[in-house]
Image (cartoon, rainbow, N blue to C red):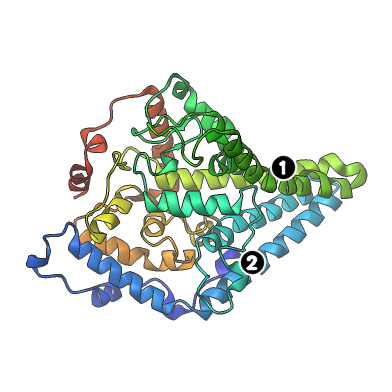
Amino acid sequence: MSLAHFSLPAAERPLTSAAVALRSVPRLKPTTEALPYAQLGAELDALKARISAELGAQDVLYVRRLDRFSRTMEAVGRVLIHVSFEPVAFGCGVLALWVHKQLQATEVGHSALHGAYDKLPGGEAFASKTFRWDTPIDEESWRLGHNVKHHGNTNVAGKDPDIHFGPVRLTERTPHKLAHYAQLPLTLGVLFPNFGFMMNLHFTGLLDAYADNGQPEGLDFLPDRSQKSRLLAWKRALRKYVPYYFKNYVVFPALAGPFFFKVLLGNWLAELMRDVYSAATIYCGHVGDDVHSFEHGTKASSRGEWYAMQIAASNDFEVSRPISILCGGLDRQIEHHLFPQLPPERLRQIAPEVRAICERNGVHYKTASWPATLKKSLKQIARLARNDPASPAKTAGLREVLRSMS
């Protein structure tokens, strides 16, 4: 069974362009256009309502099957890493274990923690408040930092903690420091290979406890740098770090006896692959010279304007279906920012409709190949490291940013 095997029924697969046209929402009368992007908001709201009404047993069946496949890959991978005596079997074991870790971090885990299955009968095992993903990232801290702070304020300075990641500046809204000159090699040499570890530092507030974020408020997650706040950050980080790394780097290697270091190496390689793959996925969705950010205090004046902000602050990239599953559907980052609680399979389904809606409403929908998008993201990190001037549209206010999209 391959990743391409996992899909919704044919009736729920992506619509053809003709079907998109037939099912599009009638345009609002000109008199309703007083609110910014009113038509965009109406069409996307209608799309969300229709897809949400379709959610049900098939979505739960999909994630259950994928989770079973993932657990099978874990068992196969760990056995091969333990018993292999030559590079081919060892490499197959590492690859299988990576597939498990990747699926648990993205297609299964990320969507579960977003609440994609919370209201679906039979989806209790994937409930956001009780689900535990096989990553070194604390679930409670992730839900607050990612679901609430990031998705509620995408790329808004002073609200979104993800306009920077540790010492790496991701938008012009983070003031430049001397340390930023080294951020490209730091990104590739430290953050990408240790992405899960670094994300836990970020979301639990450990970075806050000892480093300023460059914004006027100085902190992303902690209320202050008191001893109480620092101890809380350490507690959140360690309650995930300790059991996770003990299992992967002590327990399973110890079970191999004299082959301790071989198993340790295999587990580390699978971890490394997951971290680099996930980092490349997430950076591509959020970073680029045409990805917009917003000044302090920015608030959308309408639902349509909020949708337009999400589109302006995101990239999509084009990959095959199995690669998209390993990305957790985050190759559809525009759709994910619009509808964070939709399962990834539904993000893939609605992407053609979202693109058509953007085109009808004069909103720029950014997508390209994965290599081209990754190159664009890394070039932007390098430009931000040099503190090169941004284009006027990138540092303008909300209205100017949105006008530049059309």
**Residue 270 image offset from top left, x and y in percent:** 68, 47
Q: Which residue, as the protein is rendered here, is positioned at the far right?
A: 258
Mark 1 residue crowding within 10 angstroms, few (<14) / some (14–19) / many (20+): some
Considering only vertical position in the picture, is 231 above or below 360? Answer: above
Frontmost residue, 132 versus 67: 132
- Residue in front for this viewpoint, 350 or 38: 38
Amino acid identity at mark 2:
Asp
Residue 285: x and y in percent read 42, 48
Question: Is 81 on the left or on the right of 355, as rendered?
Answer: right
Q: What's the residue type where badge 1 is placed?
A: Trp
Q: Crowding near pointer 2: few (<14 within 10 Å), some, many (20+)?
A: some
Residue tagged 1? 268
Is label 2 in a helix, a strand or a loop?
Answer: helix
At x 67%, y 68%, the residue is 68
**Which residue was labeled with disc 2?**
67
- The answer to whether any part of residue 17 appears in the image is no
Q: How many marks?
A: 2
Name the residue at 84% across, 51% down: 82
Q: Is residue 374 left or right of residue 64?
A: left
Q: Residue 275 sits in which quadrant?
A: top right
* 337 up-or-down from 24: above or below: above
Which quarter of the figure is the N terminus placed in? Answer: bottom right
From the viewer's perspective, is 292 left or right of 242?
Answer: left
Pick out the residue farthest to the top. 178
Residue at image position (22%, 73%) is: 25
Q: For numbered disc 1, what is the local secondary structure?
A: helix
Image quarter of residue 107: bottom right
User: What whole-number distance in Å separates the C-alpha atoms at marks 2 and 1?
Assistant: 22 Å
- Does label 2 or label 1 sit earlier along the sequence? 2
Q: Position of residue 301 (x, y in %)?
A: 22, 54
